[in-house]
Image: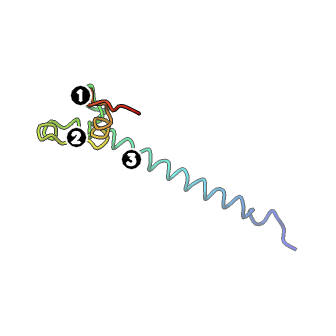
Amino acid sequence: MRNNSDSPCPLLTKLREMFKVLLFTLLIIAISVALLAITIIIKKNGKFPNTHVGGNREMRKRGIKCAQSQDKDARRENPMRVKEINT
């Protein structure tokens, strides 16, 4: 018969390993977020860059719009349309 005090509980060992992996993962994520935000933190009045198509001056000059904006414009009611008569 084995003595329980000689060997650690396998479940406890697994939990410790899982906790180490979880802490390591959280550390990697925290470092990644800090590195991605470094320009925003260092810059005075730093902001996230506007990556929307409508925020690009050259795209607007060429008449290129975001698909969502084009859809919204297409759904807008035309005040010049001919009203149909329902009979």
Task: Return the residue nearer the eye: 44 or 87.
Answer: 87
Q: Which residue is under mark 3?
A: 32
Q: Mark 2 or mark 3: which is in front?
A: 2
Quarter of the figure with the N terminus:
bottom right
Which residue ends up furthest to the right in the rendered image?
1
Near mark 1 (Cα within 10 A), the count class, few <14, some 14-19 or many ≥20, is: few
Q: Mark 3 or mark 1: which is in front?
A: 1
Image x and y of residue 67, in percent: 28, 44
Task: Return the residue nearer the eye: 43 or 82.
Answer: 82
Q: Which residue is under mark 1?
A: 80
Tag 1 secondary structure: loop
Query: Looking at numbered disc 3 in the image, what kind of residue is underneath it?
Result: Ser
Which residue ends up furthest to the front in the rendered image?
87
Q: In which quarter of the image is residue 41?
A: top left
Query: Looking at numbered disc 1 in the image, what kind of residue is underneath it?
Result: Met
Instruction: Give the vertical position of 47 relative to 25 (above or below).
Output: above
Residue 65's label in the rendered image is 2
Q: Earlier in the sequence, mark 3 or mark 1?
A: 3
Instruction: Give the vertical position of 71 relative to 85 (above or below).
Output: below
